[in-house]
Image (cartoon, rainbow, N blue to C red):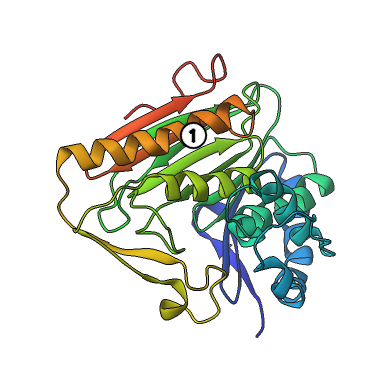
Amino acid sequence: MSHEAGRLPGGRLGLRHGPIELAIGAEGAAEDVERAYRAAEACFPDILPRLVEELPLLRAPMGSSRPRAKGPVARRMVEATWPHRAVFVTPMAAVAGAVAEHVLDAMTGAARLDRVYVNNGGDIAIHLAPGQSIAVGVVDDIARPAMDATAKLTHASGARGIATSGWRGRSFSRGIADAVTVVAKAAADADAAATLIGNAVDTDHPAIRRRPARDLQIDSDLGAIPVTVAVGDLPEAAIEAALESGLAEARRLIDRGTILAAYLSLAGSRRAALSPGAFPAMIAA
């Protein structure tokens, strides 16, 4: 399976290899942007093969012993998920964010840039030089692409990663959130936290349908664990209960310093949790 590289509208760089598809934007002096893009292209081909080599370890649930990952992306995945080992989680919960981080680091290590983003299917690693900021939008339902919330990330805030999880997304979720968007100091941390908060947005109701993950994807790291496949009409009480459960998990992770902010959406209702002082108007529904 060969990798592909090409330019996207707006002077961005597109990279694709198997399930990994990146959209990359960089700002700075023209020669620095080109140098950074070459660095991204150079590091990209090895990412998927090295992850495949360690798949058994990366798909295994975290236990009492820290996994000894070898590759740089795999090590980022372990680093991001190890703090959550008290619940069921595998390093795969941070794979998209970790890949984005790895490519971003290659770019910023090769050139001096003002702003960079590496978007891996909605899990985004960001670089902001002093004085720089970037605006991001949140879409609650990918089947209805509309801007449901916005966020402004600044250099001073320390926000360098943003990730979204939910049962409607490309990965399985044990919860029922339409979308959980998390901002953290690193993309892999945001990715793992979005997964766990998304799982926590949950309640019991007959309108929720689940199936074992392995019935949907035979090699899923979730195995026989039920994942959400449909959410029907829910009463207001069920929606509130699910969102409050997810909000409690988001606040716990903020209190631990794991994340900076979280935005939760379910059936048109929304909640936000913000790190005190970090974002005066981080996410506005």
Give the quadrant of residue 58.
bottom right
Q: How many marks?
A: 1
Identify the residue shown where x is 39% and y is 33%: 150
Identify the residue shown where x is 74% and y is 76%: 49
Quadrant location, the N terminus: bottom right
Q: Is residue 92 above or below residue 179?
A: below
> Which residue is tagged 1?
250
Identify the residue shown where x is 14% and y is 52%: 233
Q: Secondary structure at mark 1?
A: helix
Q: Nearer the viewer, residue 269 or 30?
A: 269
Q: Nearer the viewer, residue 6 or 155?
A: 155
Q: Nearer the viewer, residue 252 or 6?
A: 252
Quadrant location, the C terminus: top left
Using residue 187 as the reference point, say whether residue 166 is left or right of it. Answer: left
Percent coordinates x, y for residue 64 in the rendering? 75, 54
Using residue 15 as the reference point, say whether residue 39 is left or right of it. Answer: right
Amino acid under disc 1: Ala
Give the quadrant of residue 180.
top left
Identify the residue shown where x is 79% and y is 39%: 112
Residue 272 shows in this picture: yes
Give the quadrant of residue 44.
bottom right
Using residue 187 as the reference point, say whether residue 35 is left or right of it. Answer: right
Percent coordinates x, y for residue 42 in the rendering? 79, 65
Structural crowding at the residue carrying mark 1, measured as other residues with C-alpha within 10 Å and reported as few (<14), some (14–19) or many (≥20): many
Percent coordinates x, y for residue 52 in the rendering? 71, 76
Residue ranking furthest to the bottom: 1
Q: Nearer the viewer, residue 106 or 285?
A: 285
Residue 36 shows in this picture: no
